[in-house]
Image: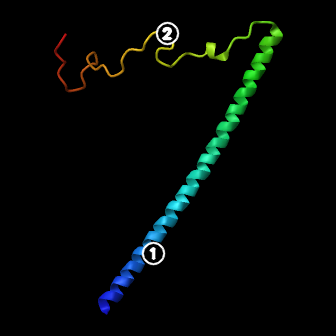
Amino acid sequence: MGAYHHSQEMMATVLAKFQETQRLQEEKYLGFRKELKSINSTLGTIVGVLKELINTRRDTVAQQGAPDTSLEDELPTTSPGASGQEAPPQDDTSTAPPADGEPPASGP
């Protein structure tokens, strides 16, 4: 009977540790969700301010009688191929300089 009682105690200990781990993970999850909500709120505020700035700029341009230009026309383009040309392949390592300690690649 002693082994049965010992195994029951071990199972109770394992269950208690599991429940504690589960509780701690739930606390972390809830904290993470709270942080995400805070970040989302901050981003919403930033987007609202940017929209107000865009509308103010459009109103100013309209009052001056100048043609309305899009803000996107003033921003630098960062996407590859945006100028109508294809972007060069990104995985072409034949022209890459050798890493430190490596001999230069021989070839064409």
Residue pictured at 48% horizontal, 69% vertical? 20
Residue 71: x and y in percent read: 66, 16
How crowded pointer 2 is (Cα within 10 Å; few <14, some 14-19, many 20+) is rated as: few
Q: Amino acid at mark 2?
A: Gly
Residue pictured at 72% horizontal, 30% vertical? 49
Q: Quadrant of residue 74?
A: top right
The mark that comes first in sequence, 2 or 1, is 1
Q: Is residue 79 above or below residue 31?
A: above
Residue 97: x and y in percent read: 27, 19
As drawn, which residue projects farthest toward the right?
63
Q: Is residue 85 left or right of residue 62?
A: left
- The CA distance from mark 2 to mark 1 is 63 Å
At mark 2, the secondary structure is loop
Q: Is residue 10 above or below residue 62?
A: below
Q: Quadrant of residue 40?
A: top right
Q: Quadrant of the C terminus?
A: top left
Q: Is residue 21 left or right of residue 49?
A: left
Q: Amino acid at mark 1?
A: Ala
Query: Which residue carries the number 1 mark?
Result: 16
Residue 81: x and y in percent read: 47, 14
Along the viewing direction, whichever of 61 and 100 lies nearer the viewer? 61
At mark 1, the secondary structure is helix
Q: Quadrant of the N terminus?
A: bottom left
Query: What mark, if any, has residue 84 been given in the picture?
Result: 2
How crowded pointer 1 is (Cα within 10 Å; few <14, some 14-19, many 20+) is rated as: few
Residue pictured at 33% horizontal, 22% vertical? 91
Residue pictured at 68% horizontal, 32% vertical? 47
Residue 55: x and y in percent read: 76, 22
